[in-house]
Image (cartoon, rainbow, N blue to C red):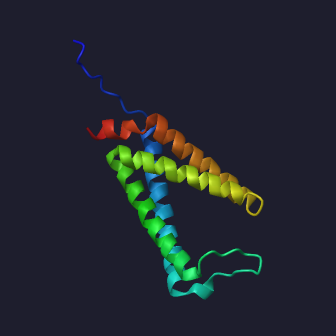
């Protein structure tokens, strides 16, 4: 029987996939809150003369709000085992790790923590992400 499909058994890594989903949902909510703060009260954020701002704070706030919504939706999609959500989550976690590498001189401990979590999320989704779908089937 060459046409038989073997079913993948779920392992303990399903918990890490769920962790990735929860982390993305929380991150999206936090980004949306930051975005709303920048939209409604742009003077709340402290800026320095050395800060390079391409946009005004309200525009940056709209960008943060949009990104936060997308990140939260991708995180929620991970619980269904959706392949598009897995791909989006890996891309978002990769961008997060790269952007935190830029801040390692300013916030070394926090940047290393975020990079570590991002790498764990990427590993869990790339290697074991399909197990969430197998568990739901």
Q: Nearer the viewer, residue 2 or 7?
A: 2
Q: Please tell me whether residue 135 is drawn above or below residue 109 in the rendered image.
A: above
Q: Is residue 94 above or below residue 58?
A: above
Furthest toward the top, the residue is 1
Q: Quadrant of the C terminus?
A: top left
The reply, left or right, for residue 10 in relation to residue 49 is left
Residue at 25% across, 13% down:
2
Q: Is residue 14 left or right of residue 58?
A: left
Q: Is any atom of residue 79 visible in this view?
A: yes
Does residue 18 appear anywhere in the picture?
no
* Residue sitting nearer the eye, 98 or 107: 98
Quadrant in which the N terminus appears: top left
**Of residues 122 and 91, the one drawn nearer to the viewer in this rendering:** 91
Q: Position of residue 47 (x, y in %)?
A: 70, 80
Q: Residue furthest front?
A: 54
Is 128 or 96 nearer to us in this picture? 96
Task: Locate residue 129, reporting x and y percent.
Answer: 42, 39
The quadrant where residue 133 appears: top left
């Amino acid at each position: 029987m060459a046409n038989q499909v073997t079913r993948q058994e779920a392992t303990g890594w399903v918990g890490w996939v769920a962790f990735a989903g929860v982390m993305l949902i929380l991150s999206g909510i936090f980004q949306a809150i930051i975005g709303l703060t920048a939209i409604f009260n742009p003077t709340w954020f402290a800026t320095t003369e050395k800060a390079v701002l391409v946009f005004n704070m309200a525009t940056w706030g709209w960008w943060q709000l949009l990104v936060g919504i997308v990140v939260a939706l991708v995180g929620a999609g991970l619980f269904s085992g959706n392949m598009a959500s897995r791909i989006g989550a890996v891309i978002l976690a990769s961008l997060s790790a790269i952007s935190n590498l830029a801040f390692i001189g300013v916030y070394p401990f926090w940047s290393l923590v975020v990079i570590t979590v991002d790498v764990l999320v990427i590993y869990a989704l790339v290697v074991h992400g399909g197990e969430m779908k197998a568990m739901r089937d």
